[in-house]
Image (spheres, rainbow, N blue to C red):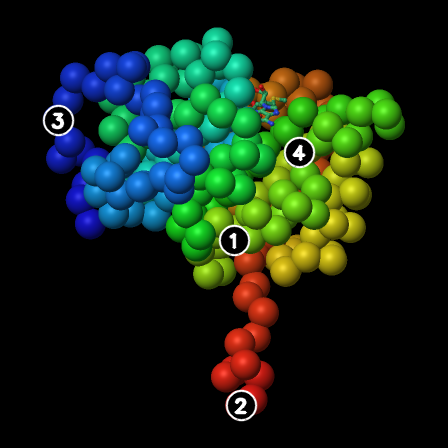
Amino acid sequence: MTDANEYSSGLIASEVELVPENYFAPLDLQKIFRRPAPVEVDLGCGDGRFLTAMAGRHPDRNFLGIERLVGRIRSACGKAARAQLPNVRVLLIESAYAVEYLLPPASIDVLHLLFPDPWPKKRHHRRRLVSSDFLAAAHRALAPAGRLRIATDQVDYFQAIRQLAAASEFRDEVDYGTDNFPLTTFEKHFVAAGAPIYRLRLRKVSPPTKASAAQ
Ligand SMILES: C[S@@+](CC[C@H](N)C(=O)[O-])C[C@H]1O[C@@H](n2cnc3c(N)ncnc32)[C@H](O)[C@@H]1O
């Protein structure tokens, strides 16, 4: 496996932004990152604080940020370039589309979904990202035993996600008190305000194949 430090220095922000050659085919992640390494994806990466902190901590892993706001894409690319992180790419696109169509099947080690837009009003709940279709697409994109990490400050969104997850092919890992992840920008604000944060860590389990069921 190549160490991130072996890449040439002088990374500039425009090199961090990923503009796919084809928006209708799965991404070639090895070509994009110029090396094979486990890939983590930050869905709705905002200003890239968490993404770049993770990439700095784990130079042996690749990190893809997905975000739909241009200004936040610029912030994230700027942070990655200033920190000279060759293991970061940032993609301007809608998360559900990316997970369904752009992430290759069984390719992603960890999907992070941290403080997704909460849409608290009942009539807006259908705009929320997490649905049974989203979970099915996330399950396809994850490598065997891959994880989907979710955090939110909205208790009703959290409960709805837990219900959807219980009916999916994910298992809640339940005990993850020892996780030590960098704070996201929104998380920093919630922590400072003493707001509760609800977390879920789901592990992909695969349905038994005919061969394994027969054993
Ligand atoms: C509440 S902010 C959290 C940002 C960051 N994860 C954090 O914790 O600091 C939600 C972010 O997700 C982005 N976002 C919301 N819905 C999205 C979608 N469907 N596709 C891509 N980005 C989305 C928003 O633009 C925003 O930057």
Residue that appears at 79% across and 43% down: 159
Dot 4 alpha-carbon crowd within 10 angstroms: few under 14, some 14 to 19, many 20 or more? some
Q: Distance between the Cα atoms at labels 1 and 2?
A: 25 Å
Residue 37 in percent (x, y) is at: 29, 47
Asked which secondary structure carries label 1, the reply is: helix
Kindly tell me whether residue 200 is visible in this rendering: no
Dot 2 alpha-carbon crowd within 10 angstroms: few under 14, some 14 to 19, many 20 or more? few
Amino acid of disc 2 = Gln
Kindly tell me whether residue 11 is visible in this rendering: yes
Residue 140's mark? 1
The residue lying furthest to the bottom in this view is: 215
Q: Distance between the Cα atoms at labels 4 and 3?
A: 37 Å
Q: Distance between the Cα atoms at labels 1 and 3?
A: 34 Å
The picture quadrant where one finds residue 60 is: top left
Between discs 4 and 3, the one toward the N terminus: 3
Residue 92 in percent (x, y) is at: 45, 22
User: Does mark 1 have its CB less than 8 Å from ligand 1?
Assistant: no
The picture quadrant where one finds residue 192 is: top right
Asked which secondary structure carries label 2, the reply is: loop
Q: Are marks 4 and 1 in contact (CB under 8 Å)?
A: no
Residue that appears at 73% across and 57% down: 166
Residue 8's mark? 3
Residue 23 in percent (x, y) is at: 41, 31
